[in-house]
């Protein structure tokens, strides 16, 4: 996440200092005539269909190339993000329906449902939230400005959606100690085949099994939050460059923080993780997803605090590399926990546009 070029434009939020944002796309708030609206509407359907086809091909590629499966699977959300952020809700919905239909025809209905639940629907929902705006006067701001849905709340929704998706996956596959015990036994058998002298202790095996049943949902949820947010960020940059962005491109180092209410959800996940059984697995999932959100916020805070410093690049590189270890990652996560806020981007109303018809794009 690099720092974007700043302008002195105000923001409002709860106890949030002013935060600069980027130039608006020239198409953001223009009063559109009937010919422009007609041309845009004509591009919605083909754009959505192309996005759905691209998403399906990426998912199929993930199944074919297991070494890059996670990256390709997360990248399948990118076409839906681009369609939703640049062409609106209808384009995103068409893309999701197209991808699900192709998945059901080419593979199976269950494959289509999994693809939609874990990647496409979250992408469509987040792009919808990103395009929401309301008069700033409703939040105590100036009368001539529009306030956009906060990035912190978008990240909160992403963590919640991934949590539900991981729990749904666990229910579908019957995840639990029996499944992870089989995985550990299979890995142990493979090691014994390579090293006949390998004889693990029973106590160590039991501890490994107890740890793995919690670590798998924690890691999977956290990685998925990070990958989907990266896809969202890339889509925002692409759409902003194209001039079709409805939402102004914000300075992520200053805007990307977690909502303060997410702290209580994260703490609840920690408590659940110590209860054992199904609650512990749910708690581990919450810790992974919301912990990833705070980790992203911590990195954004590091970028923001290091702006203009001579040591910026080497320190950021060191932080990213060391975050692969547990203790440095926890330190960055704590930084994200200590800096929670809701920064709201404000943009001027132009051309006499009414706030009512700018609450969401109507393509």
Image (cartoon, rainbow, N blue to C red):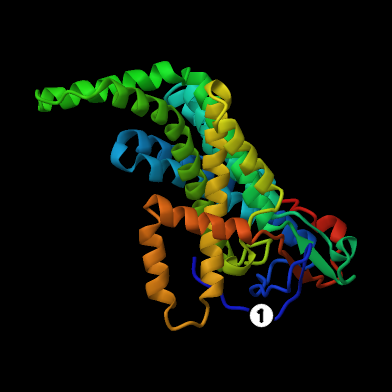
Task: Name the residue carrying label 1.
Answer: 7
- The residue sitting at 41% across, 72% down in the picture is 315
Q: Left of 211 or right of it: where is 94?
A: right
Depth check: 3 or 27 in front? 3
Q: Left of 358 or right of it: where is 155?
A: left
Residue 228 to residue 134: above or below: above
Depth check: 231 or 209 in front? 209
* Residue 41 visible in the snapshot: no
* Residue 141 visible in the snapshot: yes
- Residue 115 percent coordinates (x, y): 50, 32
Q: Left of 287 or right of it: where is 361?
A: right
Q: Circle 1 — which element?
A: loop
- Residue 162 percent coordinates (x, y): 56, 38
Q: Image quarter for residue 283?
A: top right
- Residue 314 percent coordinates (x, y): 37, 74
Residue 127 to residue 306: above or below: above
Residue density around tag 1, few if under 14, some if 14–19, many if 20 or more, within 10 Å: few
Residue 43 to residue 118: above or below: below
Depth check: 124 or 188 in front? 188
- The residue sitting at 70% across, 60% down in the picture is 341
- The residue sitting at 60% across, 41% down in the picture is 122
Q: How many marks?
A: 1
- The residue sitting at 57% across, 29% down in the picture is 282
- Residue 131 percent coordinates (x, y): 70, 55
Residue 31 to residue 326: above or below: below
């Amino acid at each position: 996440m690099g720092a974007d070029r700043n302008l002195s434009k105000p923001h409002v939020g709860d106890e949030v200092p002013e935060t600069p944002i980027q130039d608006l796309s020239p198409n953001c708030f223009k009063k559109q005539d009937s010919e422009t609206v007609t041309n845009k509407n004509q591009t919605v359907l083909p754009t959505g269909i192309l996005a759905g086809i691209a998403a399906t091909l990426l998912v199929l590629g993930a199944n074919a190339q297991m070494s890059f499966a996670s990256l390709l699977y997360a990248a399948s959300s990118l076409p839906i993000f681009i369609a939703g952020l640049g062409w609106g809700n209808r384009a995103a919905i068409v893309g999701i329906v197209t991808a699900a239909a192709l998945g059901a025809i080419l593979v199976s209905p269950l494959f289509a449902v999994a693809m939609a639940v874990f990647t496409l629907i979250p992408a469509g929902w987040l792009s919808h939230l990103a395009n929401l705006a309301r008069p700033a006067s409703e939040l105590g701001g100036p009368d001539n400005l529009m306030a956009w849905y906060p990035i912190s709340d978008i990240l909160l929704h992403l963590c919640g959606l991934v949590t539900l998706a991981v729990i749904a996956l666990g229910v579908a596959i019957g995840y639990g100690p029996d499944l992870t015990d089989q995985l550990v036994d299979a890995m142990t058998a493979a090691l014994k085949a390579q090293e006949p002298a390998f004889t693990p202790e029973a106590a160590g095996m039991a501890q490994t099994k107890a740890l793995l049943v919690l670590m798998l949902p924690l890691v999977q949820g956290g990685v998925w939050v990070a990958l989907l947010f990266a896809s969202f960020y890339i889509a925002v940059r692409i759409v902003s460059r194209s001039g079709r962005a409805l939402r102004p491109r914000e300075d992520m180092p200053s805007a990307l923080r977690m909502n303060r209410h997410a702290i209580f959800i994260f703490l609840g996940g920690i408590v659940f993780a110590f209860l054992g059984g199904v609650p512990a697995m749910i708690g581990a999932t919450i810790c992974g997803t919301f912990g990833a959100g705070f980790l992203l916020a911590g990195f954004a805070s590091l970028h923001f605090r290091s702006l203009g410093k001579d040591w910026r690049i080497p320190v950021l590189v060191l932080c990213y590399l060391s975050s692969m270890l547990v203790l440095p990652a926890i330190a960055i996560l704590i930084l994200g926990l200590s800096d929670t806020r809701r920064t709201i981007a404000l943009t001027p109303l132009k051309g006499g546009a009414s706030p009512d018809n700018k609450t969401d794009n109507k393509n």
